[in-house]
Amino acid sequence: MALSAMGPPHCGTMEPMNLIAARETAADSGLTWNPGFAALGPDFYSALRPTPLPNPYWIGRSSDVADLLGLDPHWRSSDEALQALSGNTVLPGTSPLASVYSGHQFGMWAGQLGDGRAILLGETTDGLEIQLKGAGPTPYSRRGDGRAVLRSSLREFLCSEAMHGLGIPTSRALCVTGSPAPVYRETQETAAVVTRVARSFIRFGHFEHFSARDAAPQLQALADYVIDRDYPECRSHSAFPGQPYAALLQAVSERTATLMAHWQAVGFCHGVMNTDNMSILGLTLDYGPFQFLDAFVPGHVCNHSDTQGRYAYHRQPNIAYWNLFCLGQALLPLIGDQDLAMAALAPYKTRFPAEFMARMRAKLGLSDARSSDGELIDGLLALLAQDRVDYTIFWRRLSHAVARNDFSAVRDLFLHTAEWERWLLTYSERIAHTPHALAADLMLKTNPKFVLRNHLSEIAIQAAKLGDFSALQTLQGLLERPFDEHPGHEAQADFPPDWASSIEISCSS
Ligand code: AMP
Ligand code: MG
């Protein structure tokens, strides 16, 4: 159906509005549903059904997420599941919807956005939201087609599970399905749908939306919904008595600080930290042109569309604060006092460095804190940057080196070996009081052997395009347990090949 037939983007429809829509399926998935986000009412979304896709097929599935949802063991791999999770049928008991939000994109107010291609099926009785991303147009699709291509869907599927494997807060991915239906980006590609799962998909942008429209009752209803569901402690916060919305802002700031510490420590670049991609629960959300660093280049920009480098790796913690500031502005009508809002944001500035240091200490195998640690870590990062050392390989080799008390394989990573040796001397003194076996154990559980490097995704994508999902499955197995050795898979833990540097990942997905 032509989008123009739907009229201008709006919300407020309670009835499914698309004409070619999925029919209800009779098969029992084992899922039961809460009223969830839909209970907020029609100001917050448009009810609609996914638009079917021809001849769907499975690309990848996560049995871990299927278990998490308590999916019926027979249903989860059945044709009924394939049809429902490709948007061709609707699960009984669900009222699918697309939510409306706004946001700042690349530092500029972008106005209304909304779920342009993600459709929320609902919230399970275990409190997990299930979304189909790429399931067809919505009133918020603007000029988009409501679809997602195989390439980016496979990346989102893998990275969601990789981040979970690393212990980093994230939305999860139950599965990715494909269809031969053509989707036009720079070239013709084919369609895919990712089934995403998260405690909540609410973004900073949801708050910005109602605030920008001076819709105070809706803004408050949304904040109350989030507080009652996920931040009940904000109703009785000692630092903010009688100020639940200031307490909410502080709690979100703290979770976001924790998330940034995780990203920076593992070398993850999100690529599009717009406020509409920032989770109110501090989850990693909306995987697009993300990248795990290969060489440690602090100014690395993973998103080919980010010409200004706004979302460069080393800027992420400051950008997160900028985004929190936008959230604070959005909540100001509820908080009522600018000083109070600033006070709620302030802990970010101490929480992020503290959390980052804690993670870096663990990466170094240090189980206590000393005031000189900052200098030790800064010195190391400067050396890694100077020689563009591979970030993941460095940490894994250092972990094994501590275990064996043999650092030669780490020295091989540096050009400025004398400077490395000097740093190593200080580190050796620092770690001298910790039993090395204990330190190495901590390091091997903190420094992953496997991360989702761009070239690994690319190999899995090229094979999947030809109908071979074995590379994807192997990679998924490694990333689900990234701290295990997985003998026989050294290739996936090795340096990137030369061609990896020519991979260009943009916002096009
Ligand atoms: P993203 O950069 O993927 O987070 O998307 C930003 C906004 O554009 C969100 O409102 C998306 O729903 C929307 N969007 C992105 N791609 C599409 C698409 N192919 N069709 C419809 N909406 C899209
Ligand atoms: Mg987004």
Image (cartoon, helix red, strand yellow):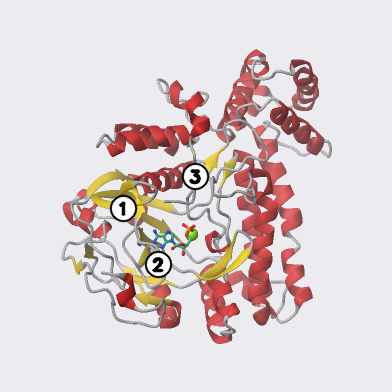
Where residue 181 appears, x then y in whole percent? 24, 52
Where residue 15 appears, x then y in whole percent? 29, 81
Left or right, residue 251 beside residue 221: right
Under tag 3, what secondary structure? helix
Mark 1 or mark 3, which has the lower sequence index? Answer: 3
Q: Residue at x 70, y 37 (%)?
A: 361
Q: Relative to the observer, which residue lies in front, 231 or 223?
A: 223
Q: Residue at x 75, y 34 (%)?
A: 377
Q: Residues within 10 Å of mark 2 (few under 14, many from 20)?
A: many
Q: Amino acid at mark 2?
A: Ser
Q: Residue at x 61, y 30 (%)?
A: 295
Q: Amino acid at mark 3?
A: Met
Whether disc 2's CB lies below 8 Å from ligand 1 is answered: yes
* Res 483 seen here: no
Q: Residue at x 57, y 42 (%)?
A: 268
Q: Relative to residue 204, is residue 310 depicted above or below? A: above
Residue 141 is marked as 2
Name the residue carrying label 1: 183
For the residues marked 2 and 3, what is the alpha-carbon distance in whole angstroms? 28 Å
Name the residue carrying label 3: 163
Left or right, residue 15 beside residue 243: left
